[in-house]
Amino acid sequence: MKYTFAVKGLDCPHCSFEIENDLKKIKGISNAAINLVTQILTVETELSYDQLFSIVSDTVHSHEPEIEVSSLDSLINTSVSFGENGDGHTYRGDNCADCRSLQGRYAHTEEDQKLDTITPIHKNNTSFLKLINSDRIIKIRLIIGAIIYAVGFTLTFTSAEKYIILPIIILAYIILGTDVVIKAFRGIVKGRIFDENFLMTLSTLGAFVIGEYPEAAAVMLFYQIGEYIQSLAVKKSRRSISELMDIRPDSANVKRYGNVVTVSPGDVSVGEHIIVKPGEKIPLDGIVSDGSSMINTTALTGESVPRSVKSGDEVLSGCINENGVLDIRVTKTFGQSTAAKILDMVENAAARKAPTENFITKFSKYYTPIVVISALLLGIIPPLFFGGNWGEWLHRCFVFLVISCPCALVISIPLSFFGGIGASSKKGILIKGSNYLEALNYTDTFVFDKTGTLTKGVFKVVNICPANGVNKDKLIETAAKAECLSNHPIAKSVVAEYGKTIDKSLINNYKEISGHGICANVNGKPVLCGNSSLMHNENISYSVNSDIGTVIYIAENNKFLGSITISDEIKSDSKNAIEQLKQAGISKTVMLTGDNKEIAERIANEIGIDECFGELLPQDKADMLEQLKQSIPTDKKLAFVGDGINDAPVLAAADVGIAMGALGSDAAIEAADIVLMTDEPSKLYQAISIAKYTKKIVTQNIVAVIAVKVLFLILGAFGVAGMWEAVFGDVGIMILAVLNSMRILRRK
């Protein structure tokens, strides 16, 4: 089962990693992931709810005692389905916004009944640490502590006596470092010795022992400044992603029994009509029944140009209605709506960490104990076996300890990926995890679907070729009636060309034949509409149509009636997108399509695709993708880009599956690793650019932090670097790395 907990106030990437790792070590817990965007902890476990809540609370508070832990779900006697392959999931909650949101998004049984709610469990920690670490108190502590320290530090340059200066420095230390010392001792009790709180406490108390008390307080001052800047950076990153999260609607105005009532979006059923007034968010996906308006899609697509909608048009939840009043017939429950799916993607992105993040976590796990032991040996071995001043070597030991703290890496690296996902979201590019963001850096081959991806997918009949003895009207009428139950763009173009109302009660035994076409009974007569393979398979003699385009052959009662040619238009920026990808270092582009080879080759040549394969069935695409994956170097990745209608299996099979313009496609959102919110292929280049820029920042931080630390550790060991240099080697480089990570959010 999966359970979710709110961890309000958690802003530290390092602490979140530690909490996740501690929970994963507990028997019965298979996975734990914290999303700093939403401050939600998700745990996969075999434990009972009551056992788990106590464990989660204790684990969180052992690292961050001031954090408020709240249960967003717990056990009741109703099983909740997450879809065809979903596990049972149970909820309870009160009428708070968080619980209503969860209930609206997830809590729907097979009978689509809403779950009853009961009060969620909260565990507030009213400790002293929570009191002194509230945002307001932290600012006051920093200001007062800095002022008192400045006074004491200034007095060291005067003739003031030590008994006057020392109490002032100690007071500054207490104001600035009390929480760090308390956390260090709690960590020791919990068996967690080698963390930054322990290192800070040990090194600063040691500095007092050897008489370096101004430096001891300085370490705490700058450490707290670094922590504060880190918190601001996380909150800024959170705000950038929260702008996207703002698509969640608060309520829906639904028409019931002649009145309009305001209810939670989760309480609206499919088929009901909602009214959306100017300035309101569209709460649920649906079809406009009445009215016309301009809708703002910025929150979903990143595009600033409003879109015009009228009766019959599809609208998606999360968009903002700008002027007219819209009457919308709901087509999806809120749990299945576009807004809910996007929110779920963003909220679960933290569970998929990049290899670099995982490496840094493992690195710090081994690095910290090694340097602590090295520091102790540095302070003991030389004076014990080779002679020398114990005070001098202890001083070097404590300098070594201050420098050794790995905070700069474990904070700045996840923060960089965090910022990269936020920067992508602003541009309408939803990335399901930092692992996929990093994978884009190693993508060598891009494979494209054609229809709806590189072409508009808006088909139009360009030629009608009836067989001898058959007139055009008869041909188009028969084809339109046979195709009227299909949602495929080709079928819709045939129906649009016919242009008359079709009595669908006259059509029965409708069947889609994957990769070939359709068959149906029209007015009691069997009709076949499809490609040449369908005619071959049914042993129907037909005249070959050599037009450039998609050709549909029509037969009635096993007699060939003629063919219809349909053409698709290439998207305006497809050619430019392929050129940009090649400029970005992509070595090969490939197009896979079920269309005939002549059409595929013409389009591929026109937009600059390197290779193309036509007349492929869905399974053929999957097989071809596997062949292409085997042909690329083992250290490279393959990305597949599709429109999500028929491409879910291939999207899932690729190293990086990218769904294009897939706002309304459930299959694409489920199967893809990256979702482009618009139909523009040029978004691919933007995604790669952000991925490369993020990788560049991450590499800069890793190289700079390790280089500075190694240099200062060597200088500290030889007595060249003192406590002030140690402060820069730890806290200074951490602040610089965090500030460097924040550059991603400012990228245009």
Image (cartoon, helix red, strand yellow):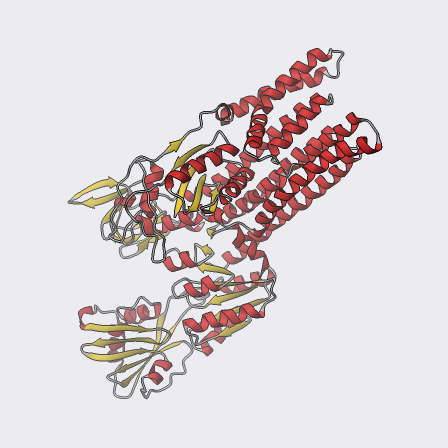
> Would you say 141 lies left or right of 490 here?
right
Residue at the extreme right of the image, as rendered? 387
**Looking at the picture, how far across and down is residue 712, in whole percent?**
74, 37
Residue lying at 44% horizontally and 37% vertically, measured from the top left? 55
Residue at the extreme left of the image, as rendered? 257
Residue lying at 41% horizontally and 62% vertically, measured from the top left? 644
**Looking at the picture, how far across and down is residue 496, in whole percent?**
29, 68
Residue lying at 22% horizontally and 69% vertically, measured from the top left? 500
Residue 665 in view of the camera: no
In the figure, residue 123 lies in which quadrant?
top left
Vertical relation: 365 (above or below) 498: above
**Looking at the picture, how far across and down is residue 443, in whole percent?**
57, 61
> 191 or 218, which lies in front?
191
**Looking at the picture, how far across and down is residue 351, in whole percent?**
48, 48
> Would you say 82 lies left or right of 635 here?
left
In the figure, residue 163 lies in which quadrant?
top right
> Would you say 557 lies left or right of 348 here?
left
> 72 or 692, which lies in front?
72
Vertical relation: 479 (above or below) 37: below
Residue lying at 28% horizontally and 43% vertically, measured from the top left? 252
